[in-house]
């Protein structure tokens, strides 16, 4: 590889980190990254002097992501049911210090919370609080004054502060709690499951109109526990179904598979203060495709209902 190609590969994860957090979709983020790296390559080919390639690609990526987010938000307004960010696989063996530093900003809970912000607010908050950009740099990215960039970030921070997720700092404790959570749900132990859920736990579901999911979020440990047990009870009727704990977006997640390994759905778990604070279930096959071969959930459910009848 040439020096320029090496540089572009070094810049790819930087660009993806910004684009994914801005858009909540790895597919949309990768499109932005490809265009951003192409623009950097063209600038280098023209002989432009780029004192900081990292800052340059961050600026280009952010501007492209803002444009993409504007059109994405319009699409999400017509989305069937609740829209949740699309998860990505992360490496559980990564250095603990590095994991803790970015776990918050990469979580599905945080990305979901960012949906209430305008594209400019989202960019200002992420670039300053997550990626360490100065307000002068942010102003250049979103083409506004430095004072306005500061105000955009401040307003965004205030809007998300109350709902900003808290997470269990100890990964082993989080995984142990997640394991007990799975066992209680599978065994139908309602009291045990309720004891693992916070009083104000929230259950979200995303089927995108392509698989059965909650029409709206559920609140409260009683309603959430019963719904989770009903769901796992349904899956348990599929002989040989696999339920296992994995990691997605630096957080514990539950993966549901058919006997042949097709992906039935996932649950993302928000764990803090020794309890499950939130569960985000995704069964939309479009959002599962990067994690495995999506199962035909509707056909499986029809077969289970027929067998039960």
Image (cartoon, rainbow, N blue to C red):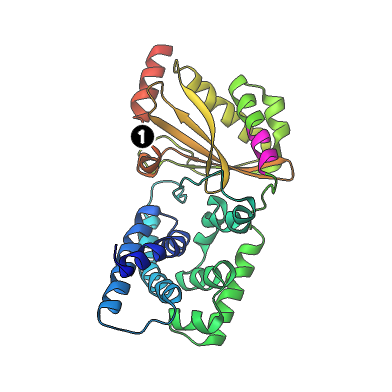
Residue visible at 36% across and 34% down in the picture: 294
Residue bearing mark 1 = 294
- Residue 19: give x, y in percent of width and height: 42, 63
Quarter of the image holding residue 20?
bottom left
Quarter of the image holding residue 186?
top right
Left or right, 224 with reference to 64: right
Give above or below for 84 relative to 142. above
- Residue 130: give x, y in percent of width and height: 57, 66
Residue visible at 44% across and 49% down in the picture: 86
Residue visible at 50% across and 19% down in the picture: 236
- Residue 15: give x, y in percent of width and height: 41, 65
Within the magenta stretch, is there residue 219? no
The one nearer the camera, 179 or 148, is: 179
Q: Secondary structure at mark 1?
A: loop
Quadrant holding the C terminus: top left
Range of magenta residues: 171-178
């Amino acid at each position: 590889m040439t020096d320029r190609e090496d540089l572009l590969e070094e810049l790819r994860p930087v660009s993806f980190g910004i684009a994914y957090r801005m858009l909540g979709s790895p597919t949309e983020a990768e499109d932005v990254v490809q265009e951003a790296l192409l623009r950097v390559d063209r600038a280098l080919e023209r002989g432009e002097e780029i004192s900081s390639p990292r800052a340059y690609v961050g600026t280009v990526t952010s501007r492209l992501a803002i444009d993409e987010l504007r059109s994405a938000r319009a699409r999400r307004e017509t989305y069937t049911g609740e829209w949740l960010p699309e998860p990505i696989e992360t490496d559980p063996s990564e250095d603990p210090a590095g994991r803790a530093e970015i776990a918050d900003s990469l979580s599905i809970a945080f990305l979901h919370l960012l949906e209430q912000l305008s594209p400019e607010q989202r960019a200002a908050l992420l670039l300053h609080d997550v990626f360490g950009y100065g307000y002068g740099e942010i102003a250049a990215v979103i083409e506004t004054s430095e004072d306005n960039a500061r105000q955009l970030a401040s307003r965004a921070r205030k809007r998300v502060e109350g709902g900003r997720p808290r997470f269990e700092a100890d990964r082993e404790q989080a995984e142990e709690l997640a394991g007990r959570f799975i066992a209680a749900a599978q065994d139908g132990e309602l009291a045990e499951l309720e004891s693992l859920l916070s009083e104000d736990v929230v259950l979200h579901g995303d089927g995108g109109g392509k698989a059965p999911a909650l029409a709206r979020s559920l609140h409260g440990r009683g309603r959430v526990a019963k719904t989770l047990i009903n769901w796992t009870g349904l899956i348990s009727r599929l002989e040989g179904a696999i339920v296992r704990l994995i990691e997605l977006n630096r957080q514990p997640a539950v993966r549901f598979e058919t006997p042949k390994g097709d992906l039935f759905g996932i649950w993302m778990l928000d764990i803090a203060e020794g309890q499950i604070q939130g569960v985000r279930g995704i069964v939309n096959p479009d959002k599962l495709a990067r994690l495995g071969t999506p199962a035909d959930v509707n056909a499986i459910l029809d077969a289970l209902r027929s067998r039960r009848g």
